[in-house]
């Protein structure tokens, strides 16, 4: 899960769902760093609709030795005139007493090395489990989500696979004694999950498993690809689609009621090698535009995408085989999910009787309602999975998915660069290959994009306040790292 990213009260009485064994979960991750985003992307805990999620997960805390480490004390805690994020997040249960809140440790930026060290010995595992319980109870969460990305990979060791199971065993004991929820976010496709998990064993100790069934394609590949296709098309890698992921996890022993299918509220962007070759699978020459809020090359939040599609004319195609949309304008290409594809995924969850859906992440849904109704992705999941009748077909446009949706482009050769930084000559920087590089004498970074003529176009990007570009992970990271 990549660490990527104003409201009046709702005008209808919230629909209260009775708790029951068959109720589908809607697990919502909240990226706490989104409070630092500019403009319409800035998100506050007060914007969360507590009736649209059964479980809310606060991200992230980190690991220090065998202890839980607060990563942003000013945002998370009340001490020293802090923003009290933990407290305000958990106070959402006062509005919806059925809501459960968890805090997540890990994430992409944390890597694997520290976690691999922690799980090596029984003493470490016991100490960590005890410390987690103290932390969760101190800050009044209902549970804890383990987002170690990924055991036995990214600096981990082969013994992580067994040690992770041993960790879950001891945590289950501590959590049962304190009536707490234990969940995990996991790699989705067979190629990665098979390296990290004994799925049948881990399923015994977790209350539910959040399968990160997205980032299946992105600018790390040399051709365009939809972020999270539901089904494969002819010629696709047969593992990299939602159907194959779910089949793998179920066949490996994950109980269907514990499998929570991840759905993304963001898309992956590419720069096409040729504006006239714009199909799924077209050649590319690097990451596409970043957004004005998330400000990460190669991705756009759904809120950024829907705003963009309202502006300059784009061609939008609903892929009939993969059951998800993509859009292009000049050399810019986006593979993403919209209301129609999310509806299909929710129906897929119902058909297979899975445990529910997980959303990464709520702050890149259209939470302000700039493009229509607030939280269209989240509300679509509720409409399908929890039979929420409060939403009208007018405000949730479940567009037909039996044919392509196409809007004609104003200028076939126009590239929309409205959210790209100004480009610079490559002579100012040491661009020898497409990719990301630190910007000299700063915490920011540049993107070197092949210009198709033997040189490079350079785009400058800024890291958020308090963050610096980490060239080892290709992300804006905490300065201490």
Image (spheres, helix red, strand yellow):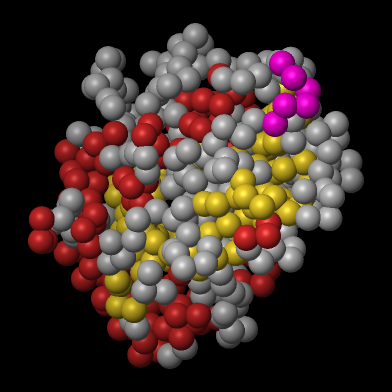
From this view, report whether residue 436 is shown above or below residue 459: below
Residue 393 falls inside the magenta stretch? no
- For the image, the number of numbered tags is 0
From this view, report whether residue 460 is shown above or below residue 400: below
Q: Quadrant of residue 363?
A: top left
Identify which residue is drawn at 36% across, 51% down. Answer: 33
Q: Position of residue 11 (x, y in %)?
A: 27, 15
Identify which residue is drawn at 22% across, 40% down. Answer: 92
Where does the magenta region start and end? 410-415
Identify which residue is drawn at 55% across, 52% down. Answer: 460
Viewer-proximal residue among 188 and 166: 188
Q: Can residue 397 be seen by looking at this rendering?
A: yes
Q: Position of residue 120 (x, y in %)?
A: 47, 88
State the residue lying farthest toward the top.
394
Viewer-proximal residue among 463 and 112: 463
Viewer-proximal residue among 117 and 357: 117
Left or right, residue 313 beside residue 68? right
Q: Position of residue 437 (x, y in %)?
A: 60, 64
State the residue lying farthest toward the left.
80
Identify which residue is drawn at 33% across, 47% down. Answer: 36
State the residue lying farthest toward the right.
235
Q: Can residue 350 be seen by looking at this rendering?
A: no
Left or right, residue 210 beside residue 82? right
Q: Main secondary structure of the magenta part?
A: loop
């Amino acid at each position: 899960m990549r660490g990527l990213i104003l409201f009046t009260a709702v005008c209808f009485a919230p629909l209260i769902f009775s708790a029951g064994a068959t109720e589908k979960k809607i697990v919502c991750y909240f990226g706490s760093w989104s409070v630092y985003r500019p403009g319409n992307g800035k998100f506050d805990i007060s914007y969360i609709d507590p009736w649209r999620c059964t479980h809310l997960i606060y991200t992230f805390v980190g690991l220090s030795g065998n202890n839980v480490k607060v990563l942003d004390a000013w945002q998370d805690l009340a001490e020293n005139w802090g923003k009290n994020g933990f407290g305000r997040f958990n106070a959402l249960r006062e509005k919806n007493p059925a809501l459960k809140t968890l805090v997540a440790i890990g994430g992409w930026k944390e890597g694997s090395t520290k976690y691999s060290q922690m799980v090596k010995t029984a003493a470490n595992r016991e100490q960590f489990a005890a410390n987690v319980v103290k932390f969760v109870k101190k800050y009044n969460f209902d549970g804890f989500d383990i987002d170690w990305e990924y055991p036995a990979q990214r600096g981990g060791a082969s013994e992580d696979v067994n040690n992770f199971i041993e960790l879950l065993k001891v945590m289950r004991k501590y959590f049962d004694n304190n009536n707490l929820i234990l969940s995990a976010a996991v790699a989705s496709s067979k190629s990665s999950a098979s390296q990290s998990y004994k799925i049948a064993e881990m399923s015994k100790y977790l209350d539910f498993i959040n399968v990160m069934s997205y980032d299946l394609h992105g600018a790390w590949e040399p051709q365009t690809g939809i972020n999270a296709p539901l089904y494969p098309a002819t010629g696709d890698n047969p593992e990299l689609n939602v159907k194959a992921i779910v089949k793998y996890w179920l066949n490996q022993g994950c109980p269907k009621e514990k499998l929570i299918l991840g759905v993304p509220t963001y898309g992956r962007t590419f720069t096409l090698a040729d504006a006239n070759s714009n199909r799924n699978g077209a050649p590319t020459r690097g990451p596409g535009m970043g957004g004005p809020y998330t400000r990460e090359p190669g991705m756009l939040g759904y809120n950024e995408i829907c705003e963009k599609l309202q502006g300059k004319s784009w061609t939008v195609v609903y892929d009939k085989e993969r059951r998800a949309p993509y859009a292009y304008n000049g050399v810019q290409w986006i593979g993403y999910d919209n209301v129609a594809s999310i509806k299909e995924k929710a129906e897929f969850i119902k058909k297979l009787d899975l445990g529910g859906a997980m959303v990464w992440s709520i702050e890149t849904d259209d939470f302000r309602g700039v493009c229509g109704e607030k939280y269209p992705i989240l509300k679509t999941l509720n409409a399908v999975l929890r039979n929420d009748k409060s939403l009208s077909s007018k405000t949730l446009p479940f567009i037909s998915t039996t044919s392509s949706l196409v809007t004609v482009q104003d200028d076939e050769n126009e590239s929309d660069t409205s959210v790209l930084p100004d480009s610079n000559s490559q002579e100012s920087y040491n661009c020898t290959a497409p990719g990301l590089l630190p910007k000299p004498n700063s915490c920011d970074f540049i993107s070197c994009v092949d210009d198709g003529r033997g040189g490079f176009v350079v785009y400058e990007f800024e890291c958020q306040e308090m963050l610096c570009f980490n060239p080892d992970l290709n992300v804006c990271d905490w300065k201490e790292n």
